[in-house]
Image: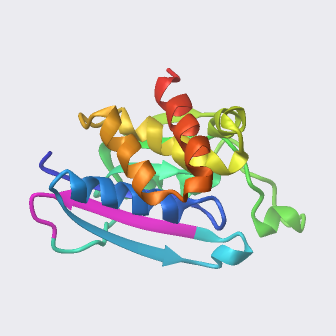
């Protein structure tokens, strides 16, 4: 791997910080220089959470500018559309099709833009129902691991490296759930 720029975006409480910690740990274990940076909006109130993960032979800054991301992992459709401009041409948006209403929709001031992913030229979009897979694995809270497993398919790292990283980072009482969630997302086409 030369270098890779990854953004993980979601709404507060969806587990994007755990996903970025897990990914950063995995890439360090594999011998890459890794920089991780977190940006919290009103995350505790359902606002955006953005994490930058950059890895390569040598990485000097964690910040990813618009047009530089190789991947955006989006835990929700609108967040995926919001951060798609960060993708480089030919970059990949891996997005959960779940829709979480932002405050303007909740208050009735706006409608949810359900077609938000339709007009993303030059971007590869992998949209899938990660929520259902997480629920089938045992908990809706495992969406983060399902998304990460779909992302894992884009790397030549062994499956066992990913599961070892999960075992290292995830609390023991949630380990079986997260391993099931990773398997569910990885084996899904």
Residue 152 in picture, x, y percent from top left: 37, 38
- Compared to 105, does 84 lie above or below? above
Q: Main secondary structure of the magenta part?
A: strand
Could you say which is closer to the camera, residue 171 or residue 152? 171
Task: Give the vertical position of 157 relative to 69 (above or below).
Answer: above
* Residue 106 visible, this orientation: yes
What stretch of residues is rendered in magenta? 49-59
Q: As drawn, which residue projects farthest toward the top? A: 189
Kindly indicate the quadrant of the structure image that contains residue 110. bottom right
Residue 121 visible (yes or no): no
Residue 75 magenta? no
Q: Is residue 184 or residue 121 the one in the foreground?
A: 184
Residue at 81% over, 55% down? 111
- Left or right: where does residue 73 sit relative to residue 153? right
Quadrant where the N terminus sits is top left
* Residue depicted at 51% across the width and 31% down the height: 183
Q: Residue 78's x, y, as percent?
A: 63, 53
> Residue 87, how many percent across, how many down?
36, 52
> Where does the image place residue 8, in percent across and percent down from the top left?
46, 58
Q: Nearer the viewer, residue 109 or 48?
A: 48
């Amino acid at each position: 791997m030369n270098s890779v720029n990854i953004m993980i975006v979601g709404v507060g409480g969806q587990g994007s910080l755990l996903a970025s910690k897990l990914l950063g740990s995995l890439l360090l274990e594999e011998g890459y220089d890794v920089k991780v940076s977190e940006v919290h909006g009103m995350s505790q109130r359902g606002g955006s959470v953005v994490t930058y993960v950059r890895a390569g032979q040598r990485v000097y800054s964690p910040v990813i500018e618009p047009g530089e991301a190789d991947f955006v992992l989006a835990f929700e459709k609108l967040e995926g559309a919001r951060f798609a401009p960060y993708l480089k041409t030919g970059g990949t948006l891996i997005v959960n099709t779940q829709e979480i209403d932002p405050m303007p929709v909740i208050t009735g001031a706006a409608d949810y833009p359900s077609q938000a992913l339709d007009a993303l030229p030059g971007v590869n979009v992998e949209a899938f129902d990660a929520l259902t897979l997480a629920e089938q694995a045992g908990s809706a809270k495992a969406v983060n691991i399902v998304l990460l497993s779909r992302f894992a398919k884009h790397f030549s790292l062994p499956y066992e490296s990913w599961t070892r990283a999960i075992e290292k980072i995830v609390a023991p009482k949630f380990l079986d759930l997260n391993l099931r969630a990773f398997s569910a997302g990885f084996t899904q086409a």
